[in-house]
Image (cartoon, rainbow, N blue to C red):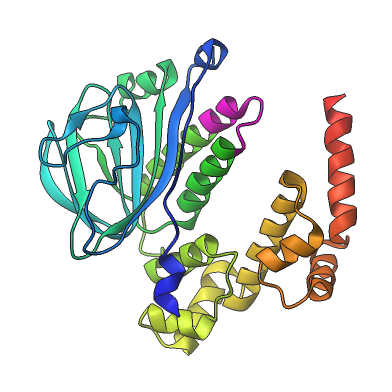
Amino acid sequence: MSDEYNNLETRFKYLIPNDRDRKFGLWVNAVGFERIPPNSSYPLKVHPLGYLFNAKRGRTLHEYQLLYITKGKGLFASEDMPERQVGKGSLFVLFPGQWHTFRSLKETGWNAYYIGFEGAVADNLIKEGFLSKEAPLFDVGLNEELVSLFSRALEVAEDDKMSSQQHLAGIVLLLIGTMLAITKNKSSSMNPKIEQAKIIMSENVLKNIDPETLAKKLNVSYSWFRKAFKDYTGFAPTKYFKILKLQKAKHLLVESSYSVTEISFMLGYESTKHFYALFKKFFNLTPLKYRNSTTMQKKSEAA
């Protein structure tokens, strides 16, 4: 099992902001997730010319980027920071006009989320000292909230609906605010094993995860894992993952045209009947009633 949990496919979306988007003060150019398996070449050669680079020579971008590593190891350097090793839990900021380079290590590869953005709002964060070219590296650890924000940004970018740029701008600010808060308030109470488990669950919500096998992957006993997870989150691992699946179901019911049967199949339920029963138990509505009521509410708000 378990190595398959982390093998998400590389996904990315490049956006074309318009003049109105730029007036908002912050806009997003690119969002993505890249998986570099061990013993493979880096960087990937599937991006537009403005984003390709030679890791030995480095590059200079016209935008800001946040890059968050959730698996593996690599190296990072910029004109203001000598080369150093980075790994899971590292988040670094790339600045416009600043030379930089980074790459995953051949023997480990890495999983990394990224988002590229521009605007006066971002420029002001530098001016006021919230971000600095001299300190681009943040040790935020494995944090499921950050992963969820990056994942949500990718969903919003791929949907590309009206005002998606303003939605993405809000996510960027929440990412930066969360990153700064974690750094300033980092404490021993954060449990990296449990955060790693939460991230694995979040990234693999369309699969079925056995908590005992997950504990084995994390090199801890299941009895310790179950107790620590419940102490940390308030839920047993099985129930936490069940709630994640149902929250994903709510999103798919509202944001997609998939049928209830298709959503049930996508989420790995043993039957549509079982999915119906669980959904109604948790939310006191059947999936169809939830879809219809939410759709009617959206139409009413738009009218």
Q: Quadrant of the N terminus?
A: bottom left
Is residue 149 part of the magenta span, yes or no?
no
Q: How many marks?
A: 0
In screen coordinates, is 91 left or right of 27?
A: left
Give the residue drawn at x 47%, y 66%: 200
| Segment colored magenta | 159-170
- The spot of residue 136 in percent (x, y) is 24, 37
- Which residue is painted at 80% across and 60% down in the image? 260
**Residue for point 40% across, 71% down:** 193
Q: Looking at the image, which is closer to me, 51 or 27?
A: 51
Q: Is residue 40 visible?
A: yes
By secondary structure, the bulk of the magenta-drawn segment is best described as: helix
Q: Quarter of the image containing the C terminus?
A: top right
Vertical position of residue 230 compared to residue 66: above or below: below
Rendered image quadrant of residue 125: top left
Q: Could you say where residue 275 lies in the image, as x and y percent from the top left?
A: 78, 70
**Residue drawn at 53 percent across, 67 percent down:** 201
Taking depth in this image into account, of 107 and 94 the one nearest to the observer is 107
